[in-house]
Amino acid sequence: MCVLFEMVKFPHASEDMFVGVQDPIVTLIALVFSIIISIGSLAWGYAEAGINSISGWIIFFGLLWLFSIRRGWRWFSSLGLFLCILASMIGLWLNFNFGWMFSGAIFALFAWDMTEFRRKIHFMTSRDDLKGMERRHIVRVILLALGGLLFASILMFLRQ
């Protein structure tokens, strides 16, 4: 926080602190794969239920979401999270495959979290342990997602 105040008062004084800060590639890869898995799960679930037109629109939205990463539209991940959870809820209400709907929602949440984490990283200085923070954050979120998927798998097994 003090660094930000220094930059406001003396914009060129602490410029060297931000040298070497880059967008971490692992977070970007995790973000892209989570969007692909989320959209793919939802599209597969809707196609499996015989609603191919909605499945096509879901894939189109996924491509738009991937395009938004390139353009830097960070607000789009919130819209993506909302629409994926809405599509999952509607799919569950219509008795579509629970696993595909749950996977679509979990990975959309993961994609939203990765977008927010990328936003947070842009405010870090070169003194911060960027790779360590990135690694710990991704491990925590992956463990949470795997726990949720394990719980959903157990529920699906018990439901049979």
Image (tube, rainbow, N blue to C red):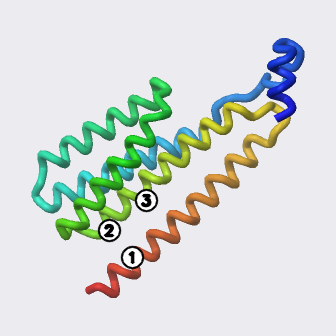
Q: Which element carries disc 2, helix, strand or loop?
A: helix
Q: Around disc 1, counting alpha carbons within 10 Å, would you say few (fewer than 14), some (14 to 19), or many (20 or more)?
A: some
Instruction: Name the residue tied to disc 2.
Output: 99
From what the image shows, is residue 44 above or below residue 77?
below
Give the Cα distance between marks 1 and 3: 13 Å
Instruction: Name the residue tied to disc 3.
Output: 106
Q: In the picture provided, is 29 more to the left or to the right than 122?
A: left
Q: In the picture provided, is 12 more to the left or to the right than 86?
A: right
Q: Earlier in the sequence, mark 2 or mark 3?
A: 2
Q: 127 or 2, which is in the foreground?
A: 2
Q: Earlier in the sequence, mark 1 or mark 2?
A: 2
Q: Which element carries disc 1, helix, strand or loop?
A: helix
Report which quarter residue 156 is drawn in. Answer: bottom left
Amino acid type, residue under disc 3 in the picture: Ile
Looking at this view, name the residue that lies furthest to the top.
12
User: Are discs 1 and 2 less than 8 Å apart at CB?
Assistant: yes
Amino acid type, residue under disc 2 in the picture: Gly
Q: 64 or 9, which is in the foreground?
A: 9
Q: Around disc 3, counting alpha carbons within 10 Å, would you say few (fewer than 14), some (14 to 19), or many (20 or more)?
A: many
Question: From the image, which quarter does the C terminus lie in?
Answer: bottom left
Give the Cα distance between marks 2 and 3: 10 Å
Which residue is at 32% across, 47% downward?
A: 83
Which residue is at 80% across, 19% downward?
A: 8
Which residue is at 37% across, 61% downward?
A: 103
Q: Earlier in the sequence, mark 1 or mark 3?
A: 3
Q: Which element carries disc 3, helix, strand or loop?
A: helix
Instruction: Name the residue tied to disc 1.
Output: 153
Residue 104 screen position, x and y as percent: 35, 56
User: Are discs 2 and 3 less than 8 Å apart at CB?
Assistant: no
Q: 60 or 29, which is in the foreground?
A: 60
Amino acid type, residue under disc 1 in the picture: Ser
Give the Cα distance between marks 1 and 2: 7 Å
